[in-house]
Image (tube, rainbow, N blue to C red):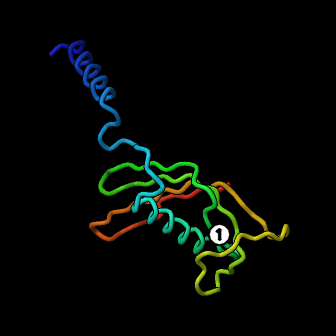
């Protein structure tokens, strides 16, 4: 087959795929209300708090965006603002902790998390996180 014909075929196939929306395995917007997104966000914060040197628990204060990619599981990319709460990591039952209001302890930042979930294998992992 002539190289020009192959190139033309690939261009037509790509255009047809683009006109139908997101390609299989491509990134798609995800709703914060989806159960998988909720689980991914909770897991990301749990892991972030375990790994951080902060003596206080941090929590998500605002979700700026979430995308998901279906591969051999689901890869969630979460862009969120987080802030320090008044709860110390050593405390029991740190859900619903109020945010710090003392200017000496107030701390907030933007974080990007990548969480990979394979529900049928009951596995979830924090692949990457970056906060600034």
Rendering quarter of residue 104: bottom right
**Where the N terminus falls, by quadrant?**
top left
- Is 102 situated above or below 18? below
Residue 111 percent across, percent down from the top left:
61, 56
Residue where numbered disc 1 is placed: 58
- Is 123 situated above or below 95? above
Residue 56 percent across, percent down from the top left:
69, 76
Residue 82 percent across, percent down from the top left:
65, 61
- Is 9 situated above or below 18? above
Point 50% across, 68% down: residue? 42
Residue 83 percent across, percent down from the top left:
68, 64
Rendering quarter of residue 90: bottom right
Point 54% across, 72% down: residue? 46
Rendering quarter of residue 119: bottom left
In the displayed structure, does residue 98 sit left or right of residue 30?
A: right
Point 30% across, 30% down: residue? 20
């Amino acid at each position: 087959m002539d190289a020009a014909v192959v190139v033309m075929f690939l261009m037509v196939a790509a255009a047809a795929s683009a006109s139908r929306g997101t390609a299989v395995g491509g990134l798609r917007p995800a709703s914060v209300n989806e159960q998988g997104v909720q689980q991914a966000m909770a897991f990301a914060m749990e892991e972030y708090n375990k790994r951080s040197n902060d003596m206080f628990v941090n929590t998500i204060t605002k979700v700026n965006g979430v995308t998901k990619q279906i591969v051999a599981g689901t890869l969630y990319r979460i862009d969120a603002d987080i802030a320090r709460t008044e709860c110390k990591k050593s405390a029991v039952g740190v859900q619903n902790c109020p945010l710090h209001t003392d200017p000496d302890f107030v701390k907030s930042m933007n974080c990007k998390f990548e969480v990979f979930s394979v529900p049928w294998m009951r596995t979830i992992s924090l692949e990457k996180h970056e906060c600034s």
